[in-house]
Each structure stands twice: as C-alpha cells, then as structure tokens.
Image: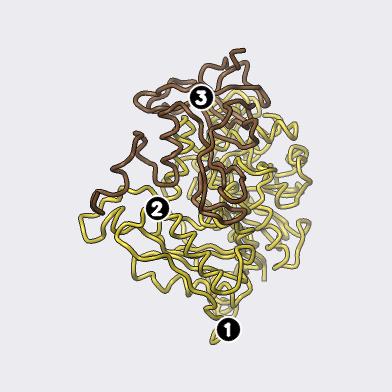
Amino acid sequence: MQLRDKTAVVGIGATEFSKNSGRSELQLAAEAVLAALTDAGLTPEDVDGLCTYTADNNTEAEVARCIGAPNLTFFSQIGFGGGGACGPLHQAMLAVATGVADVVVCYRALNERSGYRFGQAFSPVVPGSNEALATYHTFHGLMTGAAMFALLIRRYMDETGATPEDFGHVAVASRKYASTNPNAFFYGKPITMADYLNSRMISDPIRLLDCCQESDGGVAVVVTSTERAKDLRQKPALIRAAAQGSAYQQIQVTNYYTQGAIEFKETALVARQLYQQAHLDPGDIGAAIIYDHFIPTVLMSLEAYGFCKPGEGKDFVKNANLEIGGELPLNTHGGQVGEAYIHGMNGIAEAVRQIRGTAVNQVSNLENILVTAGSGIPTGGVILASA
Amino acid sequence: MTADESAGAQKTHAVECSNQDYDFFYEGLEAKQLLVQKCGQCGILRSPPAPMCHKCRSLQWTAQPMSGRGHIWSYTVHRHPPLPGFVLPHPVGVVELTEGVRVPSGLDGIALEELRIGLPVEAEFFRRGSLATYCFRRPTS
C-alpha cells in the first residue's frame, strides 16, 4: 500500500498556554480537541479515532466521553515521552489510510507546571482522568475487578434470567480443556458443576471459579506480510480481520451509566467491523477464544458477537456446545481461568496453534477462529484464518 | 497564591485522588449534600463528573443538589479480598436517583437478604474514617 499523500492534517486547535491553567488536564484535552474540530469544520460526531501519548493522563475513552464522540473504531497511545510526539500522527495516518477510521484526532494536554513539573524530581500529584474516575467508585468500596463486573452481571441475570448453573457450563468446559493442556496451571484438574456451584462467593454473583487466575508469564507474536510468510518456517495464521471499539459514553469497567449498559456495546462494535472486514458472519467462525476475565461475561460476549440473540447466551452454552464437536469450541486452551492469565495474549497464541493444527485440544477442519479482548471496556478483536 | 501553590492547596475535602473535575462532589459531601453536575447550557445532569457537556459541549455547569432518593440499579456484596477501611461483607452498588441519573454508592446498613434491584433507597451522610461520604439505606419514612 502506498502511504504517500494519502492523508492530511485538516484542523488544529489549542487552549491558551500558561503556568497555571486552573482546570483539569481532561478539560484542556477536550477544549483542544473541540477547537481542532471546529477549525476543520468538523464536529465530535465525525470523530471515530483518538490518539495520544502513554504519558498523557487523559484516556481516549475519557476524552470521547467529554466531547460526546459516538463510536471509536481506533484508539492508540505511544510511549517514550517527547519521543512519541509524532507517533500519534503516524498512527492516525495508518488508521485513515487503511480505512480503519475516518477522522482521527491526536491530542496532548498537561498541567505540567501547576500539577507536576518535569524539571523537578518527578512526583505526579494530579490524578489522571482514569484515576479520578476510578476513585469515584473505589471511594464506596467498589474496589476490585470482580466487584465492578459483578454489578453488570447481577443486572444481566435480572434482565435475562441467566442462572449460576448457566455460567457453570462455561467454567466446567474451560477447566475440561485446561485439564488436557500441559501448559495450563489447572492441567489434570477438571471441575464438576457441583464444584463450581459450591465455590465460595468473591463478590456476588461472582464465585471463585468464575475468576481468571493471577499468573506470571509472557507471550509474544510476530506479524509480517502474507507474501513473506510463504518463505518462513510455520504455517501462517492470516489476520482476516482486526478491529477496536469504544462505544458512546464508554467508561472503563464501571460502565453503568448509559441505557442498555449490559449489552457490551463496545464488543458489538468490534464484531460488526470484524464480520464486515472478513466478509463473514458468526456461522463462519469455527472456534473462539473469548476473553474470560470473569466467566459470566463470556455469555454477554457471545451475544455481542452474534453467536446467539441477546439474552440467549444461557441456552447457547448448554449441551456441551462449547466443547470439541459442539457448535462453537470455546477457549480450547482452558481460558484464562484454566491455562493462565497473560492479559489475553495467551489466547491469541492458542488461536494461532488452532490454525496451525498444533493445539492440544485441536478443532478439526478449522478455517476461521475469533479471538476477543476484554469486554466491558474499550476493546478489540481479531479473526485468524487458514491460508 | 502563586502558581507553585496551585492545584490542591485550596481543597476543602480530604479525598486525595481528586482533581478539578471531581472536587465539587467531595466538597458537597463535607456539607452533607449529594451534588451532580447540571449543564449550564442544555441543563442535562451528568454522572460521573466531566468537564464538558457531552450533549452540547458547554463548559458551564452548576453543582445541583439531589433529592437523595432513588432505587438500586444493581449491587454486589463484596466478600473477598479484605478492603482497607471497609467491614466485610460490604454491600455496594449503583443507585438510580429520582432525578434520573445514576451514582455509585455503598449500601451499608441494608440487610444482605433485603438487597434487590429496584429496592427504594435514601441517601445518608456519614464519615468513613476521616472522609465525608454517603451510603444509601432503606427510607426512614
């Protein structure tokens, strides 16, 4: 693909520059973004991408929440302080040139004199947008991932009639896969439905056996062109589609404030893009690695990915439907509850093994496998495929 | 005040992890008020706080006192792990106020077996350790 002259900077915006802005860094970011859009003759409704520095205290989701941007299909942060100054523009170029996003705004906003000083011994005292948002919740004792997701899951059960037994089907299937995976922490340790239902409550309705593990480990994957892959050692796993999503008024984890909060709208946004890019529909997906921070969210993700209708996850996961030979073999490495929690990257590695045909719990005749990132937060997904 | 003494020095609440977007909320609790931002232009309420209105992009807003009445939107009972400053099991959730906006809240004092989605509740102000806060309980009347 030719990148030369494909994309352009069409708007610039800024706040005043001072030694004491008198307002939050998030407000500075939102003001600058809005000014740049106005300069361009665009509105927040046009924005589907946001990029900044990892050093910025304002997440893309929080800036989007302020300006009221609709769905984001691209978000990215670049590291290395000032060395990352042109990185967001590079990201924007790639995203727009490839059609991943249409309008990307790059921003950097800081109270670097009144809040903390790069010229002094570094000690940030101004909390970032996410820290202040988190404290709005942790202040009341809503302090763990399990408790934060528990509220959504409680609501999901209330609205759909899903029961602990329904969740148990996913937990039992995952641990069955893990029991035959020598790399899994729970190798040789399957569980029964009774084990699941009797496991102690962590944060109602989340039980111990709903929770992913705490693990140490590392995973990496290499990407190159399909052309070059032909000369390399392994059978390639083609990236048939990849997408990101952050939905309207999205909040990280404690996403309780919009209508239809239990629908995992960010996940559905990723699903729509993946199927469109890949020219596939859910029926073409032969296996899936669904991010299992907490087992009940798997049902909500299955619905968002269109494997069943909203509220019907509880029926889909029954009758060994997630096992080899079922409609959708799921988390064949044992998931993050069974193998290890390497923040989803071990799921990508499992999907590659499935496409290569080298998984310990191998799905036969597999053409397309879905891998998802954590749901209920700005998220992503990929479809890997056989050549 | 000089720039060196800025941000934080004027706070009248004790919540460390706050900033200009959230200070009004914790200051309200010091005065036993549950405050929610109301847009100065289009008038919508917003929670959690944000410096800009997501509907009309106005930066003008006021801190609107809420009635303190509502119902439980969802909840959990935190049982593990131990939480600094909280007695376990700790009920916590999100309350939908009669004004239509939702706020997170401890549900201290509601019997665990009484907890349910839709339960009518009322705000009560108290101190959790040194911090002014609130929880929602069953209405007193």
Viewer can see residue A275: yes
Disc 1 vs disc 3: Cβ atoms closer than 8 Å? no
Residue at left offset 71%, top offset 44%: A322
In the picture, which chain is brown?
B
- In 3D space, how far apart are the residues under numbered discs 1 and 3 (Cα atoms)? 55 Å
Residue at left offset 49%, top offset 33%: A142
Counting from the top left corner in percent of width and height, residue B98 is at 65, 30
Q: Colour of chain A?
A: yellow
Counting from the top left corner in percent of width and height, residue A324 is at 71, 48
As drawn, which residue projects farthest toward the top? B141
Mark 3 neighbour density, 10 Å: few (under 14) some (14–19) many (20 or more): many
Viewer can see residue A346: no
User: Dot 1 corresponds to which residue?
Assistant: A6
- As drawn, the label of residue B135 is 3
Please state, as top left, top right, bottom left or bottom right, where the N terminus of chain A lies in the image: bottom right
Counting from the top left corner in percent of width and height, residue A355 is at 64, 62
